[in-house]
Image (cartoon, rainbow, N blue to C red):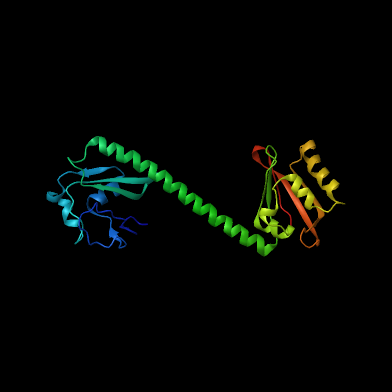
Amino acid sequence: KDGHENEVLFLDAGGRPCTVDPSLPMPVRGLRGTAYSSGRTVYENDFTRSEWVEFMPEGHAALENVMFAPLLIDEVTVGILGLANKKGGFTDNDARMATAFGELASIALHNSRLFESLRDSEKRLNRSQKIAHLGSWELDLISNSLYWSDEVYRIFGLKPQEFSATYDAFLEAVHPEDRAAVNEAYSGSLREGKDTYEIEHRVVRKATGEIRIVHEKCGAQEAGRRARAPA
């Protein structure tokens, strides 16, 4: 994280003898350190006689030539792509290709981190909603598709595979005597261009017939979507 050593060294020795444990951390130094600190691709075609060879760990596969390309996210080096032992040596064109590949790898890494962060946030949200007995859902007015958080399913006593995730399916879960009022509150907000509205109504849990009272607050969002939060 501080740029001083790899957390894990992934090594493909290309069939050459190598006894270095690939799971061991390795200091970011030598030519690899140059690529890391400068943020640019570097290579050495006479590695065995270069100053960098002294940084080779004992048991490492023999290297004739090497190339290191940085992985950059927001102009900060977050990793290194290493290549070695190209027949005939590396060229400037190879460096450009490695740089481009590093950019693609950086995008993939960045997206992976964003996905992990989003998934962690969703887990925290679900835990919080479960504790507070508060759910949220979002309706796409164009496709009529509906997204429910886990807690909404628990409130309504449904499972995702039992719910078609549409506004009409939601209305079916509303108590028959309350459906007209719920639909009018929703339709009226669209008709009158309201940013928010609130309504309290009953829902009937399909499996048991149990009746529950929920309070919903709906607010307009961008791109023609609307979100509700039953509790």
Residue 214 place in picture, x, y as percent: 78, 57
Q: Residue furthest bottom?
A: 131
Q: Nearer the viewer, residue 39 or 94?
A: 94
Q: Is residue 149 visible?
A: yes
Quarter of the figure with residue 151: bottom right
Q: Quadrant of the C terminus?
A: bottom right
122 is higher (above) or lower (below) than 103: below
* Marker count (numbered): 0
Query: Could you tell me which residue is drawn at 65 percent across and 57 percent down?
Result: 150
Q: Residue furthest right?
A: 177
Query: Could you tell me which residue is drawn at 81 percent across and 54 percent down?
Result: 200
In this picture, residue 207 sits left or right of residue 15 = right
116 is higher (above) or lower (below) than 191: below
Residue 145 place in picture, x, y as percent: 68, 43
Q: Quadrant of the N terminus?
A: bottom left
Query: Could you tell me which residue is drawn at 58 percent across and 59 percent down?
Result: 124
Q: Is residue 134 visible?
A: no
Query: Could you tell me which residue is drawn at 19 percent across and 46 percent down?
Result: 65
Quarter of the figure with residue 193: top right
Residue 71 place in picture, x, y as percent: 35, 46
